[in-house]
Each structure stands twice: as structure tokens, then as C-alpha cells.
Image (cartoon, rainbow, N blue to C red):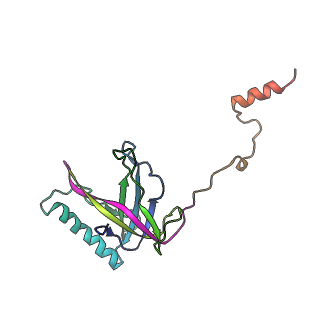
């Protein structure tokens, strides 16, 4: 794995690298593990990394290749013009023997195995990845595939609280589900 590339230490969003793969955005495609790395143009290590992405494209496809509209997995952040989002994903695939590919390896800042906690937006990580070069009628490009990640600063993901029945007061005279009405009608003596 020495040929893996690494991102600089950066904030991440939508980290779905733990456990089972998640459904792909396009439901016809296989499930995947993914993460968005937030790169800040004001940080020199991030600037250098962003500039190196073009070099990786040229190494894989050459100067004369036709670039796809989405030839690199990086795009501007819609809310902050100083930020770029570097998206990585790796698909879960089934091998010939019936086994499936494994999730990327996650470690803490001391290289210990990850404890399974979910990684929330704002966590800071370094992600090791490889390139998958592709080409088609629309042009050529690269997909970054995460293999391993080091969590340096954890913001633990906490799901939004769910509403419960106790959050609502009964409203007399309101709609009552038909099954409930039948039960009440049977309990009325004539």
C-alpha cells in the first residue's frame, strides 16, 4: 500500500467509511463507502494538494486526453468560495468466491484500530486513497478511492432526535384510525 496517496489533514463531511456500505446516490449502482474532504485555499498544504490533483490526471491520461466535465472529484463548496470539496468513494463489490470487499480501515491518531464511533461533520482526518482512472465518450477522469483514514479530531455523529408519541397531546374530536374506532365500538355495551 505504499503507492497510496494521502490528503493533508482536513475537515471532513458526510463520512460514510464505517461498517456496511451505504446506498449509492444512484440506486442502480452498488453500495459504497464515501467521504468528502474539505480543502481550504487559505492553507498552503491544501493549495499544494489541490494543485497536485491536476498532475495526477496528466500522469494517468496524458496532456492530449479529452477531459470529462467531472474529470477530477473536486468541486467548489456552494457556501464558501475559499473551500473545495474533494469527494472520495469506493464501491462494495462481490468477488468470484462470493465474499464482498471490506470497508476502508479507520485508525485513531495513535494508529489504534477504530472503536466504531460514527464520524460527524467537522471531524479532521487524513485519508489515504488510490486513483481509479476511467474514460468514456464524454472524456477521461479520475475517481479517488479511500483505503484508510486516520481520525485526528473527532466530532462524533449524533443522529437527530426522533419524535415520540409523548410529544403529542390527544385532540378530542380529531381523526381516529379505523381500527381504533372498531375496537371502541365493540367495547360499547347496548
- Horizontal relation, residue 101 to residue 159: left or right: left
Q: Main secondary structure of the magenta part?
A: strand
Q: Position of residue 65 (x, y in %)?
A: 14, 58
Q: Residue at x 31, y 75 (%)?
A: 47
Classify residue 8 by image quadrant. Answer: bottom left
Q: Residue furthest right?
A: 190
Q: Position of residue 126 (x, y in %)?
A: 40, 71
The quarter of the image holding the N terminus is bottom left
Q: Position of residue 190 (x, y in %)?
A: 87, 20
Q: Residue at x 83, y 27 (%)?
A: 187
Q: Is residue 37 above or below residue 171?
A: below
Q: Residue at x 12, y 60 (%)?
A: 64
- Horizontal relation, residue 92 to residue 186: left or right: left
Q: Is residue 88 above or below residue 171?
A: below
Classify residue 53 by image quadrant. Answer: bottom left
Q: Residue at x 39, y 65 (%)?
A: 148
Q: Is residue 181 above or below residue 32?
A: above
Classify residue 104 by image quadrant. Answer: bottom left
Q: Residue furthest left?
A: 64
Extent of the magenta region: 136-158
Q: How many callouts does the rendering have?
A: 0
Amino acid at each position: 500500500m505504499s503507492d497510496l496517496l494521502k490528503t493533508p489533514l482536513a475537515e471532513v463531511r458526510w463520512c460514510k467509511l464505517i461498517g456496511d456500505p451505504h446506498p449509492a446516490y444512484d440506486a442502480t449502482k452498488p453500495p459504497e463507502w464515501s467521504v468528502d474532504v474539505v480543502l481550504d485555499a487559505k492553507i498552503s498544504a491544501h493549495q499544494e494538494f489541490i494543485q497536485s490533483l491536476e498532475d495526477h490526471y496528466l500522469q494517468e491520461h496524458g496532456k492530449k486526453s479529452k477531459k470529462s466535465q467531472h474529470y477530477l472529484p473536486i468541486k467548489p463548496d456552494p457556501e464558501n468560495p475559499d473551500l473545495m470539496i474533494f469527494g472520495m468513494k469506493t464501491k462494495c463489490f462481490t468477488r468470484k468466491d462470493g465474499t464482498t470487499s471490506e470497508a476502508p480501515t479507520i485508525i485513531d491518531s495513535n494508529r489504534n484500530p477504530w472503536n466504531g464511533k460514527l464520524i460527524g461533520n467537522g471531524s479532521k482526518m487524513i485519508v489515504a486513497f488510490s486513483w481509479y482512472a476511467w474514460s468514456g465518450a464524454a472524456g477521461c477522469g479520475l475517481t479517488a478511492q479511500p483505503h484508510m483514514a486516520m481520525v485526528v479530531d473527532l466530532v462524533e455523529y449524533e443522529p437527530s432526535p426522533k419524535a415520540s408519541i409523548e410529544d403529542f397531546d390527544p385532540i378530542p374530536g380529531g381523526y381516529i384510525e379505523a381500527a381504533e374506532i372498531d375496537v371502541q365500538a365493540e367495547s360499547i355495551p347496548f
